[in-house]
Image (tube, rainbow, N blue to C red):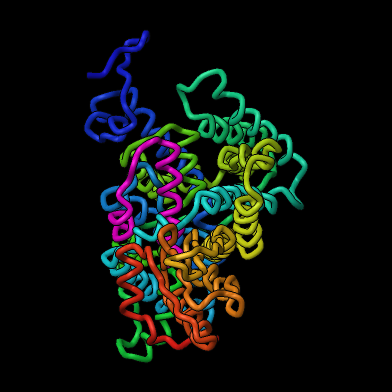
Amino acid sequence: MATKTTAGHPILTPEERQSVLRTLKSPRLLKTEVLAGLVVALALIPEAIAFSIIAGVDPRLGLFASFTMAVSIAFLGGRPAMISAATGAIALVIAPLVKSHGVDYFIAAVILAGIFQVILALLGVAKLMRFIPRQVMVGFVNALAILIFMSQVPELLGVPWMVYPLTILGLLIVFGLPKLTAVVPAPLVAIVVLTLIAVVASLAVPTVGDKGEMPESLPALFLPNVPLNFETLQILFPYALAMAFVGLLESLMTAKLVDDVTDTRSNKTRESWGQGAANIITGFFGGMGGCAMIGQTMINVKASGARTRISTFLAGVFLLILVVALGGIVALIPMAALVAVMIFVSVATFDWHSIKPSTLRMMPKSETTVMLATVVVTVWTHNLAIGVGVGVLTAMVLFANRVAHLVTVERHIEEHFGEPIAKYEVNGELFFASSNDLYTQFDYAEDPDRVVIDMYNSHLWDASTIAALDAIAAKYAKYGKTVEIEGLNAASRKMRERMGGKLGAGH
């Protein structure tokens, strides 16, 4: 049973805050969701237009994609309050196809990518998230914060001088207002205040309208005009597969981040096929496709306090209303206001604790290396998928190297019924990185005729280790000595019985 605060509002658990029904019954919570959706919609417009330009398509394709993605994922997704829309990552992947084959092939690739995402979800791709280390996650978040900030820099270069005081005022509002009141989202206040100043004072500053024309009609059903044959599939396949992987990776990483921020869990498998279904729907409505947007999601969850699917749904609805019915008004919003909001999101997203001197001193160098590798590659390539891939690969190599050095071999000479025996005790996990050195740890020439290798405190993980043990036995056999291996656990013994003597000595 929820307890009451001094203000008379019930204290809800994080899971209860995600309930759509409970939110609809609470004017206070519903207001938070509605205002959050409005703020996200306003911030989505210039980004959707900008991503359309990156992809080389009409801005309407980005705006329609943001509407259909947000509305679809509100019902289909597995992570409440997460925002999906047209994204830069997808635009970068798909842009070459637009240039070489045109918009129809582009839309067909979006639909095919959605199909791939549904298939990957059914195959359990979401389970791969467990193999992404925490430091890769930290690097992903920090890199994304840097990219969000970098994306705003062009809006501050070569512009009228009035842009700078407007941006500073916007930053003062978004950083300062939350310390005074949380009744209205600070980003929304910044957008409204700066727009009023720009309009009343007739300031000649860049606006949302300068980014591209607003659509004048609703999105309609669109069937791409492409030949349905194997040649078309060959053209679409690499782009669609890349889009599917990049979209899923960014979406699942963002979902995990929101899980941490809200202290709740989400259904990653549902989110995976939901993203696929949303892309299929988006493609058939002529949208450019997309995935989860960490910047807009952080505006929704962290800056505005939204927690349910209502905010995601309303972000899409408000977006459509704003660009179709109120496009003239939206076009007046100065870009300085949105720059201030996105800089705030960048600062709020960055994990400042991860770069504190005390944290860096405490953290193993290998962990810091993984985080830095993820950040550097992501920022350098502007591709989150490549950055995360490099981060995971770096973590694997460093982990394997560290574990390999934990294996020890101790030699003892014992007497057994008057017969000398060389006994070796092997401790640690044996796999390709550690077992390669195992062969050199034995004194083949000096050992007595009987050798015992005690594996009680070790475990065999792969064929490399079996081959190494076979090589050791073969080496002793050349000296006319026998080797006994004892103490293997059940799994290791079964592996050795299956592969022992069948892999070649290897030395």
Q: How many marks?
A: 0
Write the residue at 40% across / 77% down: 104
Which residues lie in the magenta part? 245-274
Residue 467 located left or right of residue 401: left
Query: Is residue 300 toward the left or the right of residue 340 in the image?
Result: left
The secondary structure making up most of the magenta span is helix
Residue 498 lies within the magenta run: no
The reply, left or right, for residue 445 in relation to residue 163 is left
Which part of the image, by quadrant, shows the C terminus?
bottom right
Q: In the picture shown, does residue 207 fall above or below 503?
A: above
Identify which residue, 256 or 246, lies in the foreground.
Answer: 256
Does 19 sit left or right of 232 as displayed? left
- The residue positioned 34% from the left and 31% from the top of the image is 14
Residue 254 in view in this figure:
yes
Q: Is residue 267 magenta?
A: yes
Please report the residue visible at 24 percent of the width from the left and 29 percent of the height from the top: 22
Depth order, front residue of 329/278: 278
Looking at the image, is 496 positioned above or below residue 340?
below
Find residue 59 and report its horizontal and vertical position in percent: 49, 61
Quadrant for the N terminus, please. Answer: top left
| Residue 63 seen in render | no
**Residue situated in front as seen by the camera: 115 or 129:** 129
x, y percent for residue 409: 55, 63
Estimate the x, y position of residue 390 in percent, counting from the top left: 57, 64
- Measured along the vertical axis of the image, is residue 203 above or below residue 424? above
What x and y, as percent, mark residue 243? Answer: 44, 69
